[in-house]
Image: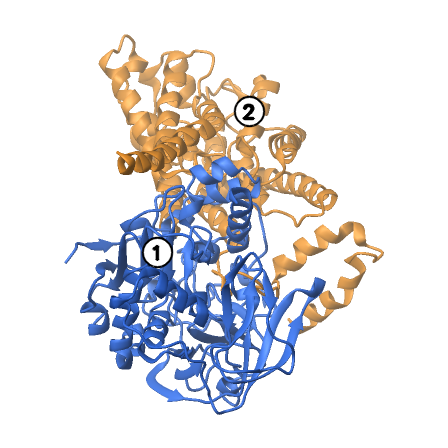
Amino acid sequence: MKALRNYIDKIKPQFEKGGKLEKFHSTFDAFETFLYVPKTVTFRGSHIRDTLDMKRTMIVVVIALIPALLFGMWNVGFQHFISLGETAGFWDQFWYGFLKVLPLIIVSYVVGLGIEFIFAQIRGHEVNEGYLVTGFLIPLIVPPDIPLWMLALSVVFAVIIGKEVFGGTGMNILNPALTARAFLFFAYPAEMSGDKVWIAEKADAFSGATPLGHLLVGDVDKLPSFSDMFYGFIPGSVGETSTLAILIGAIFLIATGIGSWRIMISTVAGGLVMGWIFNLFAINDYMAMPAYYHLVIGGFAFGAVFMATDPVTASQTGMGKYIYGFLIGVLAVIIRVANPAYPEGMMLAILLMNVFAPLIDHYIIQSNIKRRLKRVKIKAA
Amino acid sequence: MSEVHRIRRGLDIKLTGEPEKKVTAISTDKFALKPPDFMGVFPKTFVKEGDLVKAGTPVFFHKYRDNIIFTSPVSGKVTEIHRGAKRKMLEIRIDSDGKMEYESFGKGDPKSMSREQILEKLLKSGVWAYFRQRPYSIIADPENTPKAIFISAFDSAPLAPDYDFIVENDVQAFQIGLDALTMLTSGKVHLNVREGQTKSRAFLEARGVQINRFAGPHPVGNVGVQIHHVDPINKGDIIWYLNPQAVIIIGKLFREGIYDASRIISVCGSEIKNPQYFKVITGTSILPLVKDNTNSANVRYISGNVLTGTKIDKVGYLGFYDQQLTVIPEGDYHEFLGWAMPRFNKFSYSKTFFSWLNPSKKYALDTNMNGAHRAFVLTGQYEKVLPMDIYPMQLLKAIMVKDIDLMEQLGIYEVDEEDFALCEFVDASKTEMQSIVREGLDLMLKEMS
């Protein structure tokens, strides 16, 4: 360890201002601070600081995503062999999925972090850790068979248009991972929808429709069992299928305090309430489907736990978080059930509420301001 | 008695190095008045280097309010007027002659004096310097009549001194000080005590004041939080506030007719060998307190507590408003993969480390920043440690963009730096919040005057 530290200290001057590798300062700094917590000390304000920093925050989210990732890897293989009508052992299934998913993760990180490093250098900033999470989320919300160049393109779009143009992590309006997903959805609809894409190297004869695919055409009776959908033995995007794995992540996020339980709970509540309302006025089988089915179908759970809770793009006030989450749940179900053009409503619901989150906060803040003004009036009266 | 104000939001950071409850009187020979301690004051001196002064002799005054004068805490000789960049006056150093002669300001019973007489005595003796006002947390203006005066009889900050213990021998002076204060406000003097912990009769049996009871974690002892819950500041309101030891100094001024600037401070922190209380005089050099009393050489000397104090040198002087000297290790070391490690010896308010499993453990925290500055990302963290009906992040952003109207609407009059100290501590983005709040207050002060 000592040797590594010495080596870093030795090469450091080259990356400082005036050194010959000055252009790579941000990159160097990112790696140095990755390896070592910097020795910076406080100089004004509080002399002691909490141990939590942005790196820790982001790594906690990444850890929360690991159950969904591992399950997703296995499920990719599982679905593949089912579609071929073959039987394969657990490790064969996992290995197949692992080889499918790993390239997605590598492409996502290499492309995304590359852009982040360049922007950090241009701005003279340190590299932000936000992409550690975004880059992990993107592979989990795409179909397993997506061409890698398409994924790369969506990452470029998401990082530059979704985030960097606004000033980088902390300044963006839309969730970058969902921006990537939306880009793919609208730019390459053929590869992102229909029945063909959700199972890797599927045999043509096999249907392969996702639960949402069945629902879109009104085949409610073809839905897999609730427990299959809850455990995640269904086709779909890599990380979204297993509600159970996502639930484990959710518990971890809530326990560590990094994910907002307000948003998660209210999103689920919104979905259930809207589902019940459809039940009351049901005129077709989809509307009559039990409301809680919505929670385990498609990307609802994944979106509620990992996407809606992105603190930068969500509502920032306590009360605002309830409203924001609730409306996401409501909208997601409305879009699913009432709009035949989009089988999955979660992505659009979250993106839409991302845009409205500042407005919600605005009214919450205004009520705080009014409370303060009222205090004066009561006194004056 | 009134109901208890129970505060739920906040955080007690438990540190090692609590002071032992014993007082040692220590005579030091070097002192300094530090004009930067007095917010809102533009100093102009009365004295030159080499002048002889007594305790209570004017040393400098406020250029724009020349009846606010600052007097020497000891008798001796002015040795140096230390200036920094742009000739800014940083320290006026005074060497004690060891005789402790006092200027006489005449005794008097505040109950039989008029407001003007009391004010005059406070101003002439320089004791006025202990009065500060909200909003802005600057030195109080004697032209104003505040709607209330607040005294927090307990300090909830990490390793804070115990005022019950400090006022033990000055109960009478404290009451005389309170008698004087009640004459200065159009409203009440609020004496805020900690439910279940404040036991001293100096506080619980104080007369002529309203005693408010508070319970909860730090920052419950901050006067800003107490004002917010008892009598919040609206635009145009002025509240004065003082430390209990300042009240004792006022009491002694009326009882004995002198400016007796002695106070009891705690010398504490994980790097102090024998943490305990010392009886010293305002503005004392800290060298005699820490010499051969620290565990290592690479330490930080903080005048005040770890959250809001000021970094000073080993040969530096205690701040005018500070009641404790805290010494903690410097954190200038690299930690391999620290952000990924369990770090059992580090404290975090969040549950991403393991400190929450052992809530009673005490820590020896150092000054490492534990990360680097980032944009605001996490939300809802600051609210948990700021027990006020204020949106901290929104207020900070309003200050950063210098939006005066918004700052006012979001409640800048109700806060000062120390109220944001815990927000700054827990912040994962490592934002310098106390500096931002000070900038905002300075800006408001400039715009409003």
Q: Is residue B6 left or right of residue B68?
A: left
Q: Nearer the viewer, mark 1 or mark 2?
A: 1
Q: Is residue A334 left or right of residue B438?
A: left
Q: Secondary structure at mark 1?
A: loop
Residue holding disc 1 = B10
Q: Which mark is residue A186?
A: none
Give how far across and how far down residue B206 sits, in percent. 21, 68
Q: Is residue B438 visible?
A: yes
Mark 2 nearby-residue class (10 Å; few <14, some 14–19, many ≥20) = some
Quarter assignment of residue A12: bottom right
Marks 1 and 2, how far apart in space?
41 Å
B11 or B172, nearer to the observer: B172
Q: Which mark is residue A182?
A: 2
Please determine whether, in this image, residue A322 is positioned above or below residue A98.
Answer: above
The quadrant in which the N terminus of chain A is found is bottom right
Residue type marked 2? Ala
Give how far across and how far down residue A154 sits, in percent. 63, 29
Q: Callout 2: residue from which chain?
A: A
A119 or B204, nearer to the observer: B204
Direction left: furthest residue:
B1
Q: Callout 1: residue from which chain?
A: B
Quarter assignment of residue A35: bottom right
Quarter assignment of residue B403: top right
> Which chain is the one coloured blue?
B
Q: Which colour denotes chain A?
A: orange
Q: Secondary structure at mark 2?
A: helix
Label tally:
2
Q: Is residue A230 left or right of residue B87?
A: left
Give how far across and how far down residue A9 sits, in percent. 73, 67
